[in-house]
Amino acid sequence: MSEVYLQVIHKNIMKMTNRWTLMKIENQIEEYIKQNEQILFQNGTIEDVLDIRDTIITRISQLRREELLKSYTEEREKREEPEKPEESKSKSKTYQFQKYYCLIEKKIQLERELHAINNELLLVLAK
């Protein structure tokens, strides 16, 4: 095979992003090598075919690594992700509501106590 043709093949392989397609092509090349081993040796093209296969294997490894890095990065970002403004507002509103509710309960309790004190005062004054 010509050197220019091999370079084009290698460049096209390195541009591919579908790992499954590359794996399928790799398997097809393996089968082709098994079926045509003698002819490839006689023609002297076995090295070229093996280089193409190796480039495919390298690209598959790169894509796997990229996928792993992406999953690690996404997982890490999820763990370190700061609160979103909507969540912060929601939590703030919830906190304010809880605080308001507690204040209302306290007010009701104080009004009951004040009412009880007023009743005691009325009883003392009535005597």
Image (cartoon, rainbow, N blue to C red):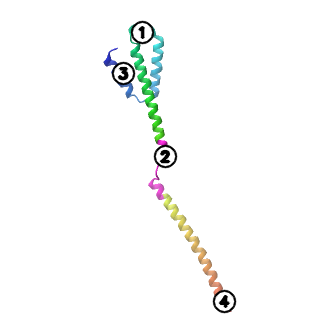
Identify the mark nearer the N-term, 4 or 1: 1
Q: Amino acid at mark 2?
A: Lys
Identify the mark nearer the N-term, 3 or 2: 3
- Residue on which disc 2 sits: 78
Which residue sits at x=56%, y=71%? 104
* Other-residue count near label 2 (Cα within 10 Å), few / some / many at <14 / 14–19 / ≥20: few
Which residue sits at x=45%, y=21%? 26
Q: Which residues are magenta?
A: 74-89
Q: Quadrant of the C terminus?
A: bottom right
Q: Position of residue 115 (x, y in %)?
A: 62, 81
The local secondary structure at tag 4 comes to: helix
Mark 3 and mark 2: span between their CA atoms? 39 Å
Circles 2 and 1, Cβ within 8 Å, touching? The answer is no
Q: Position of residue 94 (x, y in %)?
A: 52, 61
Q: Position of residue 51 (x, y in %)?
A: 40, 19
Circles 4 and 1, Cβ within 8 Å, touching? The answer is no
- Residue on which disc 4 sits: 124
- Residue on which disc 1 sits: 41
- Residue on which disc 3 sits: 9
The local secondary structure at tag 3 comes to: helix
Badge nearest the viewer, 4 or 2: 2
The local secondary structure at tag 2 comes to: helix
Which residue sits at x=49%, y=61%? 92
The main secondary structure of the magenta stretch is helix
Identify the mark nearer the N-term, 3 or 1: 3
Q: Amino acid at mark 1?
A: Phe
Q: Amino acid at mark 4?
A: Val
Give the quarter of the image for residue 53. top left
Mark 2 and mark 1: span between their CA atoms? 53 Å
Mark 3 and mark 1: span between their CA atoms? 20 Å
